[in-house]
Image (spheres, rainbow, N blue to C red):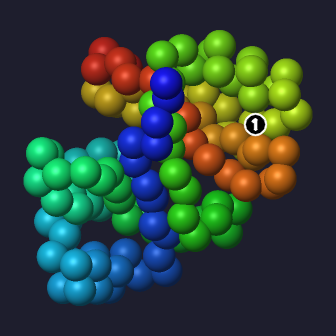
């Protein structure tokens, strides 16, 4: 069953947000060595319940928090989203070395992400 596996928190000043979440909650946060400003947030040990996430620079078209759901087939799940009244907000894109993802809206207008893991994504 697909589960929420990642969250994203947007911020006007990501460095300030990194400091806040690191200090308040003790999260281990490090800047991702990728094509955009993105800070990966480890929220606890792997053997403890919970998910990890990230802090990213705010984009006016994105909500303040986005949950990402792990799916086996992004193409098939995108088709299901559309068939059931959802909309695609940002089409399928590669995240180098991680996989493919897309952002969608549910029937209530809530944005969510979907990720298909594929380390060969480029």
Where is residue 68 drawn, in percent x and y?
50, 44
Q: Which quadrant would the C terminus be assigned to in this image?
A: top left
As drawn, 38 above or below 92: below
Figure quadrant of residue 61:
bottom right
In-image side of 65 versus 41 (left or right): right
Where is residue 94 drawn, in percent x and y?
46, 28
Figure quadrant of residue 110:
bottom right
In-image side of 49 versus 55 (left or right): left
Q: In this view of the protein, can residue 116 be seen by the observer? A: yes
According to the image, label 1 marks what residue?
88
Q: Nearer the viewer, residue 103 or 58?
A: 103
In-image side of 77 versus 45 (left or right): right
As drawn, 43 above or below 11: above
The residue depicted at 23 percent of the width and 62 percent of the height is: 43
Q: Secondary structure at mark 1?
A: strand
Where is residue 64 drawn, in percent x and y?
58, 70
Where is residue 114 drawn, in percent x and y?
55, 35
Q: Nearer the viewer, residue 74 or 49?
A: 49
The residue depicted at 39 percent of the width and 42 percent of the height is: 5
As drawn, 54 above or below 76: below
Q: In this view of the protein, can residue 32 be seen by the observer? A: no
């Amino acid at each position: 069953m697909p589960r929420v596996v990642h969250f994203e928190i947007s911020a006007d000043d990501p460095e300030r947000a990194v400091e806040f979440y690191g200090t308040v909650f003790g999260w281990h946060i490090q800047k991702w060595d990728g094509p955009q400003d993105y800070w990966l947030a480890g929220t606890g040990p792997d053997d403890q319940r919970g998910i990890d996430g990230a802090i990213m620079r705010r984009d006016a078209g994105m909500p303040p928090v986005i949950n990402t759901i792990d799916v086996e087939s992004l193409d098939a799940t995108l088709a299901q989203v559309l068939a059931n009244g959802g909309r695609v907000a940002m089409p399928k894109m590669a995240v180098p070395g991680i996989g493919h993802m897309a952002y969608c809206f549910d029937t209530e207008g809530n944005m969510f992400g979907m990720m298909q893991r594929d380390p060969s994504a480029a």
